Image (cartoon, helix red, strand yellow):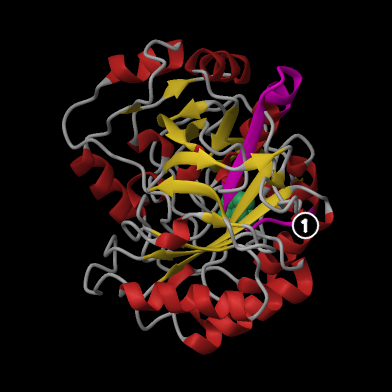
Amino acid sequence: MSGSEEVEVYRNDVDRRDFMKILAGAGAALCAAHLGCSRSAAAAAAEAAAPAGETKAPSTKGPFVSDHEALEYEKLDGGAVHCLLCPRGCTVRPGQRGYCRVRENQGGTYKTLVYGRVCTAHVDPIEKKPLFHFLPGTTAFSIATAGCNVACQFCQNWEISQARPEDLPSQDVPPAKLVEAARRSGSPTVAFTYSEPTIFYEYELDAAQECKKAGLHSVTITNGFIRPEPMKRICEPLSAVKVDMKGFDEDFYRKYVNGELKPVLATIELVKKLGKHLELVTLLIPGLNDSEDLVKAQSQWVVKNLGPDVPVHFTRFHPAYKMTNLPQTPERTIMRAREIAVAEGVHYAYTGNLDGSEYENTFCHKCGKKIIKRHGLYVEEVRLRDGNCSYCGTAIPGVWKA
Ligand code: SF4
């Protein structure tokens, strides 16, 4: 997760009661709790486990038995397995884990160590994801497990994304319990977010299906670094997908993400083709992925391959994780990126993490009137009628009814 949606990590002792209250649905008001990890322990463990190179799997310390078999893998000779979930394609020997730290070869069978193993739960405005064209003004019951299949040097949630599951306190939250908790919180949507939902794929799939059966929406906030077949499968029960497009540059992906751009673009095109609601976010980092040429090329790709109606967000970087030496993104860079996107034909381009920006509002692309007024993450006014601009009647792309 690149960090457009930072999750709060408490620095003091575990506040298990708050977390349990959220799971039990107590306190329906907007609230947040983290199953508090000891930051120092988690941080040290995450640093120790931080991947040094391509497909180098951290070793397992001590027995950690899971009874949940992973999907999307094949068995190889000699007890090894080949993971087919994401493009990294780890080959994992018995007793070892994949790069993401949460999938383990236990005696020749590949197991997920994070099925239902929730390390953080929050009730967030849907705008925090950010999804601006999806049930504006509602909340999303948002959860994550430990782990990630990339290693962004600028990750704002690295304490959970770069940790092993045993390094963070967690709660067992089976899909039915998640649905129940979301319902009680009054949220119409469950969001799989904060770390990288691809790595808790088996849980996400079952939970999204359970949500659908129960009449709840579910959305995924993903880096898009997943193979097409599992992406197709997970898209089926989901209502919306937000993809972090971390930069329009393979070198940037290789150097700062330890991933690849090409499969991410393929995922984005697939989501669009499947007809799911899609929004894109790019965190602009000074000097690394924020050149006008890159933003222009990215915007041209979006319009050509997805059309003009996919909302695009350009968000401001704050120093984090291994990039505390860089300054935050200048406001002008974010504003200019939005201008470039609009000039290239993107209908709905937004700024993010900029206090009081006019471009956190939604303007009808046809008549230019303000149709959703926001202040930060909060929606103050919606001028839509049945999904159409209430001034000129133009259809506005998005999901507007629960
Ligand atoms: S999901 Fe994890 S184990 Fe599987 S290929 Fe990707 S990084 Fe490797």
Q: Secondary structure at mark 1?
A: helix
- Image vertical order of residue 46 relative to residue 348, above or below: above
Q: Residue 383: where, in percent of width, then height?
A: 59, 43
List the residue tagged with mark 1: 272
- Image vertical order of residue 182 relative to residue 279, above or below: above
- Image vertical order of residue 195 relative to residue 170, above or below: below
Q: Is residue 341 left or right of residue 217?
A: left
Q: Residue 126: where, in percent of width, then height?
A: 51, 39
Residue 232 is one of the magenta-drawn residues:
no
Q: Is residue 353 visible?
A: yes
Q: Quadrant of residue 8?
A: top left
Which residue occupies the foreground of this view, 214 or 196?
214
Label 1 is placed on what type of residue?
A: Lys
Q: Is residue 317 left or right of residue 15?
A: right
Which residue occupies the foreground of this view, 331 or 61?
331
- Residue beneath the point at 38% across and 47% down: 375
